[in-house]
Amino acid sequence: MRRTVFDEDHESFRKTLRAFIEAEVAPHYQEWFDDGLVPREFYFKLAELGLFGINVPEEFGGAGLESHKFEAIQYEETARAGVNFGGSGVHVLLALPYIKMLGTEEQKQRFLPAFVSGEEMWALAMTEPGTGSDLAGMKSSARRSDDGSHYVLNGAKTFITGGVHADRVIVCARTAPPRDDDRRFGISLFAVDTKSEGYVVGRKLDKLGLRTSDTAELSFSDVVVPAEDLLGEENQGFSYLGRNLPSERWGIAYGAYAQAAAAVRFAQEYTQQRTVFGKEVASFQNTKFELAACQAKVDAAQAVADRALEALDAGELTAAEAASAKLFCTEVASEVIDRCLQLHGGYGYMNEYPVARLYADNRVNRIYGGTSEVMKTIIAKSMGL
């Protein structure tokens, strides 16, 4: 069916991005995959392409647009090529909204030009060892100095995407103990300079999938954070996190749909080229039925993802709607990619085939940004259950 979510400008961007991937990413991707991260210099190329400034106001060097549609195209094109851009998605989709929403004029002047140029890559550090989805249970602390000039940060974070290459990290830490009637109270957000003394990047984690996306453990030992690097109001961080979760979950949903669509494409191409018993695998009724069923599921996921995109751009995507989109698209993608891998036979289990990488990359979609079980809880609550 005809899609109406993208216009001519979006499709022109798609062509540019596709050509960029073919020239600058595909020839090097195996090396990046083996290394477990993209080179830091690659982010400057993404910046030159304009990917970091699309949603940044013009006065800070950006394009001044307020739309996630260019990000959506990036999800589709990277999945189509079987690649990803490392931690750049966190830089744009997760970190930028906090700078725009919470940053003072002075902070925006200080942070955004380097953000757009790629000179400062950003990450977001919420999760801690032992807390998982229970963000209110975080133990990292930031004690304000007696003269109020700075905070002293201590603690640890884990599963931090972009954590190896990051130059600035938005760190969530407790500046006050939780209240008896509100355990979410007391969390604050800080834009921490990763060159600060006592800031340590620990292990680059060895993940099942998303191999080129650097994911790290971080630790803070008496890290001095200037008071002017506090984002928003002290002790109100949890409410800020809640405001941005719908956009984060939309991104996961859209990425999952794009991966499912790519898997169908890979499976169709493979089965049309592969012969068994003297016939193309695609000519067997079982193959046709499997691909047809997968395509129908992708069509449904695309409709949900596009609808959520339009709602997000309109500022109308609710927490429950974002949870629903994430739950549906990630569950559909899991099933579709598994069935498409099966159509590859033994070759589907080899990392040289993109469907194998998709299979591994996709699995985390039902975990990060809130597990599928958490999504069900949010949806049930919105139903009055």
Image (spheres, helix red, strand yellow):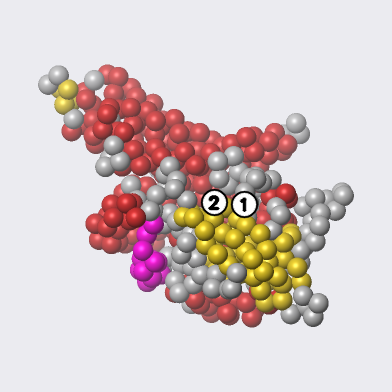
Q: Considering only vertical position in the picture, is 181 above or below 107? A: above
Quadrant containing the C terminus in the rendered view: top right
Q: What stretch is highlighted in magenta?
A: 37-48
**Pointer 2 or 1: first along the chain:** 1
Q: Nearer the viewer, residue 372 or 164?
A: 164
Q: How far apart, in angstroms, are the residues tagged by discs 2 and 1?
A: 7 Å
In the picture of the structure, the residue carrying the numbered disc 2 is 159
Q: Residue at x 72, y 72 (%)?
A: 151
Quadrant containing the N terminus in the rendered view: top left
Q: Which type of secondary structure does the marked residue at label 2 adopt?
A: strand
Q: Which amino acid does label 1 sit on?
A: Thr
Residue 29 spot, x, y in % from top left: 30, 54
Report if residue 335 is visible in the image. yes
Residue 52 spot, x, y in % from top left: 46, 67
Q: Considering only vertical position in the picture, is 228 above or below 364? A: below
Q: Nearer the viewer, residue 89 or 298?
A: 89
Mark carried by residue 127: 1
Q: Which residue is drawn at 30% across and 19% down?
A: 286
Q: Which amino acid does label 2 sit on?
A: Phe
